[in-house]
Image: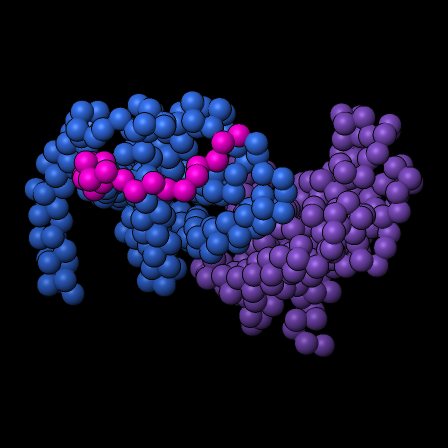
Chain colours: A blue, B purple
Amino acid sequence: MNSISGALRTVYGWWWLVLPPVSGVAVMAMIIGALVVAPREIVEGEVQRLLYIHFPSILAAYGAFAVVAVASVVVLWRRDMRWDAVARGAATVGVLFTGLTLATGALWGKPVWGTYWTWDARLTSTLVLFLIYAAYLLARAMADELDEAAARFAAVFAILGALDIPLVMFSVTWWRTLHPQPIVLRPGGNPAMPPEMLLVLLIAFLGIGALAVWLTVLRSEAEWLAKRTAALRAVADRYEGA
Amino acid sequence: MSPAMAVVLKDLRLAWRDRAGWASAGAFATIAVLTYSFAFDLATGDVRPLLPGVLWTTFLFAGIFAGGQSFARESEEGTFDALLLSPVAPTVIYLGKAIANVIAMLVIEFAQLLLATILFDTNLVSVELLVIVFIGTVGAVSLTTLLATMSATMRGRAMLLPVMALPLLVPLLIGAVRATGASLNLEAGTAPWTLLLTVFALWSAMLSVLLFPMAVER
């Protein structure tokens, strides 16, 4: 057991050496690449450059929500509150990047589709995803740091949410496709990408991916420290009271 | 008498004693339908395109409010902890509550369907529609009962419960509104939507039964 935690600590320290510089350099490279290196898209114009944030962000969000689901299963199974801190940290990052996806999508949609928002299946299901995990964070914020019952409740809700996502996607697709499609422009066939664009997109995956992992680590660490502080404060209060 | 039956009877008796609470959920549903009819001016023109949405949002809101309060008394009085200590499986405790809540909700919903039939001069009491309402209620109540049990001791529960339940219930709402619309001949065929509704009801009932014991473990 000790060797495992020792190994974890080594990996963790190593992450601290690697993640901040990697995400910093890759995000800078992404910004320069997206603004300077990548060519201007002929049909969509400059606004297409938002894609370099938009697409990697939703993948990062999916990754974060997968971490929430796995960590929540471990909370119920092992009753280890460290995993609750991980779930909470990953949920914060997931909500952040889902919000970023929705925001960049809306900014892109206005000039290209002619509207910020359309009730397209993919947009709608992403919004529901955002709302489910925002509700998760609200429930966590309203509960006491040390309330294990609340942590288990949140874990059950996160598992329900994760398993609900396929149903939401499926039902929303039916809802839209058995209905007249919006008249606004819809993305047509995907044209093959010039190599420069593909390169910038790959750098963006690396940058946003590393940033998401690093933020999740930071956030989970902060949650865990907050829990320990609350526990210590409870002990100190008991001594003062006695 | 089996423990399961005893728990169901206990919850039905509680629901009956708490009839003022359930009556206020019924009154809320009635007022919601009336509010919608003023807001959308349902008194004139063809109301049928709006009716499914009006009915199902009313059912969901009433169900969430009533389900939320149905556990409040038990957690305040400590009955819930005592039940968990008794030699009854947690699944049975959950099923008892869920069955009592489904029965109480069905009574409220049937009353609303009768009322809407009279108010909007549209026949809403058909076998097809009653089946849809039954499946939808089972799906919604099994999920809200689970969330209500777990959040019974949390502060801000009244606000938190709808915020947590409604995004999860999006597939159910879509399926129920479409199936109801189809049963009113607004679109072709109830079958695909009833299927979606049934899948969701099975999903939420099975997951709730599985997850409830883990959620309430002390």
Q: Is residue A216 visible in the rendered structure shown here?
A: yes
The location of residue B197, given as percent across then percent down, is 65, 56
Q: Residue at x 8, y 53 (%)?
A: A10
In this rendering, the answer to whether B135 lies above or below B40 is below
The boundaries of the magenta stretch are: A184-204
Residue at x-position 33% and y-position 24%? A45
Evaluate whether residue B58 shows in this view. Answer: no
Quarter where residue A32 is shown: top left
Q: Report the side of B92 relative to A133 (left or right).
A: right
Residue A154 locus on image (x, y percent):
43, 49
Reply yes or no: does residue A187 show up in magenta: yes
Q: Residue at x 12, y 33 (%)?
A: A25
Please identify the residue farthest to the bottom as the structure is shown: B1
Residue A101 figure quarter: top left
User: For the point 56% across and 61% down, which residue is it?
Assistant: B203
The quadrant holding residue B190 is bottom right
Residue B34 placement (x, y as % from top left): 81, 31
Q: Viewer-proximal residue, B151 or B78?
A: B151
Please say whether residue A52 is one of the residues in the magenta stretch.
no
